[in-house]
Image: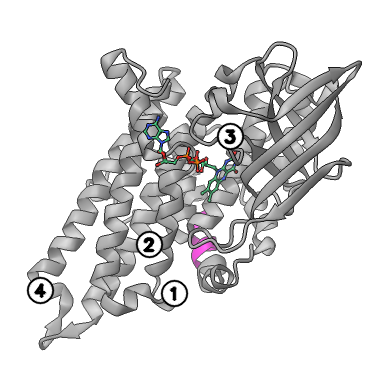
Amino acid sequence: FAPLSSDFYGYAEALLSDREQEAVMAIRAWGEREVQPIIGGYWERAEFPTEIVKPLAELGVLSFAWDETKPFENSAVFRGFVALELARIDASVSTFVGVQNGLAAGSIAVAGSAEQRAEWIPKLASAEIIGSFGLTEPLSGSDSARGLRTTARREGDEWVLNGRKRWIGNATFSDVTIIWAKDEADGQVKGFIVPTSTPGYTATKIEGKISLRPVQNADIELRDVRVPEALRLQNANSFRDTAAILRQTRAEVAWAAVGTAIGAYEAAVAYATEREQFGKPIAAHQLIQEHLVNGLGNITASLAMVVRVSQMLDAGTQRDEHSALAKAYATARMRETVAWARETLGGNGIVLDYGVARYFADAEALYSYEGTREMNTLIVGRTITGEAAFV
Ligand code: FAD
């Protein structure tokens, strides 16, 4: 097992079992061999490398979290490391997995019935089908809890869905989308497993992104989309149930933020030791060393936080404010770290070929999705003060 040089205190990876370490190493080796060389081109063309989907499934990445599919007992810290390793290679790849696994399969795991879990989770874990998660709308982002306009109307054994969704990851090629909508009868948010081939469902790719360009985000329109009651998530009865899904995925985004910071930091260290100015490697200049040390400090502090939050998930003590603080903190520290890394490369820091520009641009989306830094900060602020500043 080769520890990351950026696990500076050398304790985090030691928390993994031998089996978990083996799996992390396999994912790291695959990512460096198969993804790193090709991802810059996909980023530039704003295309998703669909050829990596089956290998991700074969490596177990989509299976580890679920009782129905996990190849061996594993911890939340291990699954965090999986997100970290993927984001260390590329944050669009970790985002694809976060949507397929954490958001789509996760919705069914948390809010589906036993029959729904048995039917859908193995298909998502094997990548037989691709999933996406439709919560955000054109007119409601941070205030999704109360601001959803998409409606669900019960007619006999069917539900009729109407509305629009925005930013939905994987949605240009997904087979099913979890659609969150307000029940016209009781006003509560409910979730539906919607096959994307259903009449009235359309998805249109969002063009012109400057961050996570390979991720296929879409605007979705739902016009009298009919789904049977059997496709309503049976245990999603209010937004509280949606929030329970986001609590877990936010912690994984925090892990991915640490991975993104590490990817940029490692590239900056490598560049600084090779590039010479004023007759010596730039790594020998004091201010460059400061960039690198600040980056390592951010990574070390964030890693400690995400490890603890995952341990709390396994212990059953993790609450919304715990993952919210980790997400807000780790993404803010990531944003500083990728900026220092970019600065370390000078002009080459804005060119895809040099391996830092992509992390710098991708950090912006991680900073804002799954709850912006502000919203996650306010979740923690509510806990500290007892005052909810956002309602
Ligand atoms: P807004 O809510 O309009 O916020 C704009 C600004 O105002 C932000 O800075 C915000 O923090 C601030 N703000 C808002 N309210 C307050 C307040 N009360 N106090 C202080 N500041 C406030 N959604 C999905 O459902 N599924 C997906 O797969 C998905 N994938 C995404 C992928 C990408 C690349 C991106 C960029 C977004 C994705 N999203 C997805 C949507 C994402 O979760 C939202 O962008 C996010 O929640 C913020 O919502 P918004 O963009 O509408 O910003």
Residue closest to the eye, 8 or 370:
370
Q: Are marks 1 and 3 in contact (CB under 8 Å)?
A: no
Residue under numbered circle 4? 285
Give me the C-alpha separation between circle 3 and circle 4.
45 Å
Residue under numbered circle 1? 352
Instruction: Kindly state the secondary structure of the residue where label 1 is placed.
Output: helix
Residue under numbered circle 2? 360
Q: Amino acid at mark 4?
A: His
Q: Amino acid at mark 3?
A: Ala
Instruction: Single out the mark in the foreground, 3 or 4.
Output: 4
Q: Circle 4: is it few (<14), some (14-19), or many (20+) Cα within 10 Å?
A: few
Instruction: Single out the mark in the foreground, 1 or 3.
Output: 1
Q: Residue drawn 69% across and 49% down?
A: 171
Give me the C-alpha separation between circle 4 and circle 1.
25 Å
Residue closest to the eye, 113 or 25:
113
User: Which percent across, then down, holds residue 266?
Assistant: 32, 64
Instruction: Kindly state the secondary structure of the residue where label 4 is placed.
Output: loop
Magenta-drawn stretch, dominant element (helix, strand or loop)? helix
Give me the C-alpha separation between circle 2 and circle 4.
23 Å
In magenta, the rendered stretch is 26-32
Q: Quadrant of the C terminus?
A: top left
Instruction: Kindly state the secondary structure of the residue where label 2 is placed.
Output: helix
Is residue 100 visible to the viewer in this orientation of the structure?
no
Is residue 251 visible to the viewer in this orientation of the structure?
yes
Instruction: Kindly state the secondary structure of the residue where label 3 is placed.
Output: loop
Dot label at residue 65: 3
The numbered mark, 3 or 4, whose residue comes first in the sequence reads 3
Q: Residue drawn 67% across and 42% down?
A: 132
